Image: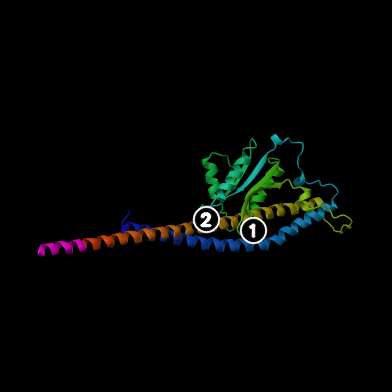
């Protein structure tokens, strides 16, 4: 059994750790709130773009646009696929990074020469260590995502797609499913599919809209913004999910620390009680010895 001083030292160490986990919980709570506000502020813009594309599609009997070209003439095994993988810059977030990397590895193994785009230092270090070729790493932090960063990523993948160096582009990220639940998800960014923008309403006359210089030109300008908006939404969702996972991990760590402290307090009281009992026994034994000497 450890002595009282050792137990007190362990208790102090746990209390210091609790201060850190509580501080990290509060920081993540603040950042999660900020991320949710950012997402709510940009959702109207994203949905407006989506509705605009849907309106244009309703006026185009047949889509002749590079972003909607599914390239069906290319066999599945020959398709060049790109994966944008969104991880965190640091750990201590439960299974957040593990789930993203696991899903990425599963899909990377399905094709011969995938192009990998990694966001987040943890993902970059992991794939580099595993000697998985990375097409491009976006070295800026995934903290506080911005529309400008999303546009930079979108421009790069759109460029490769237009040059036919990529036939399919996917994004692997973590989304929020309610206040406390998160889920790792993979969605296809390119090519776009008409069905994603809703079917044309039946029995309702089409509104009259003027598209200059042409519907195709309008689409070529809108789609890059739509893709950038989609990526931005995924970055914000991932940012919120990361801090939600970190909050849960820190809460679990704090609760475990409290349980350990309770057990150590009980052990400390037992040790102290045993020491007091021993001291009383020694005092009584000494008194008896002195009494026998006098006699």
Q: Can you say whether 199 is above or below 39 in the image?
A: above
Asked whether, in this view, residue 52 is left or right of residue 184, the answer is right
User: Most prominent secondary structure in the magenta stretch?
Assistant: helix
Magenta part of the protein: which range?
283-295
Closest to the observer, 97 or 95: 95
Q: Residue at x 77, y 46 (%)?
A: 68
Please state the horizontal and vertical placement of residue 122, each as a whole percent of the image. Answer: 53, 48
Q: CA distance from mark 2 to mark 1?
A: 17 Å
Q: Which residue is mark 2?
A: 249
CB of mark 2 within 8 Å of CB of mark 1?
Answer: no
Please state the horizontal and vertical placement of residue 257, each as a whole percent of the image. Answer: 45, 58
Residue 178: assigned label: 1
Asked whether, in this view, residue 198 is left or right of residue 96, the answer is right
Q: Residue at x 57, y 58 (%)?
A: 244
Closest to the observer, 27 or 137: 27
Residue 50: assigned label: none
Closest to the observer, 198 or 290: 290
Callout 2: SS: helix
| Crowd tier of the residue under label 2, counting other residues whose Cα lies within 10 Å: few below 14, some 14–19, many 20 or above | some
First in sequence: mark 2 vs mark 1: 1
Q: Can you say whether 165 is above or below 142 in the image?
A: above
Residue 36 occupies which quadrant of the picture? bottom right
Would residue 137 be seen by someone viewing this image from the given angle? no
| Crowd tier of the residue under label 1, counting other residues whose Cα lies within 10 Å: few below 14, some 14–19, many 20 or above | few
Q: Quadrant of the C terminus?
A: bottom left
Q: Residue at x 54, y 58 (%)?
A: 247
């Amino acid at each position: 059994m450890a002595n009282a001083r050792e137990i007190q030292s362990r208790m102090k160490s746990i209390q210091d750790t609790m201060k850190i986990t509580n501080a990290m919980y509060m920081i993540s709570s603040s950042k999660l709130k900020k991320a949710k506000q950012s997402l709510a502020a940009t959702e109207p813009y994203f949905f407006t773009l989506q509705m605009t594309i849907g309106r244009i599609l309703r006026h185009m009997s047949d889509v002749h646009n590079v972003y909607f070209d599914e390239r069906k003439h290319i066999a599945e095994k020959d398709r060049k696929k790109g994966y944008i993988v969104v991880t965190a810059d640091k750990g201590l977030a439960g299974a957040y990074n593990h789930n993203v990397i696991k899903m990425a590895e599963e899909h990377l193994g399905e094709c011969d020469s995938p192009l990998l785009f990694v966001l987040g230092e943890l993902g970059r270090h992991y794939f580099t260590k595993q000697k998985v070729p990375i097409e491009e790493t976006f070295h800026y932090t995934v903290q506080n995502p911005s529309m400008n960063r999303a546009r930079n990523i979108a421009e790069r993948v759109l460029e490769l797609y237009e040059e036919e160096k990529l036939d399919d582009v996917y994004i692997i990220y973590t989304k929020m499913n309610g206040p406390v639940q998160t889920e790792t998800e993979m969605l296809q960014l390119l090519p776009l599919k008409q069905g994603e923008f809703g079917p044309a309403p039946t029995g309702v006359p089409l509104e009259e809209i003027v598209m200059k210089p042409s519907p195709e030109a309008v689409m070529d300008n809108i789609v890059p913004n739509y893709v950038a908006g989609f990526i931005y939404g995924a970055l914000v969702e991932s940012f919120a999910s990361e801090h939600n996972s970190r909050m849960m991990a820190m809460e679990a760590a704090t609760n475990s620390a409290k349980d350990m402290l309770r057990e150590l307090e009980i052990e400390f009281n037992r040790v102290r009680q045993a020491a007091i009992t021993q001291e009383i026994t020694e005092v009584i034994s000494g008194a008896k010895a002195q009494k026998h000497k006098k006699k």
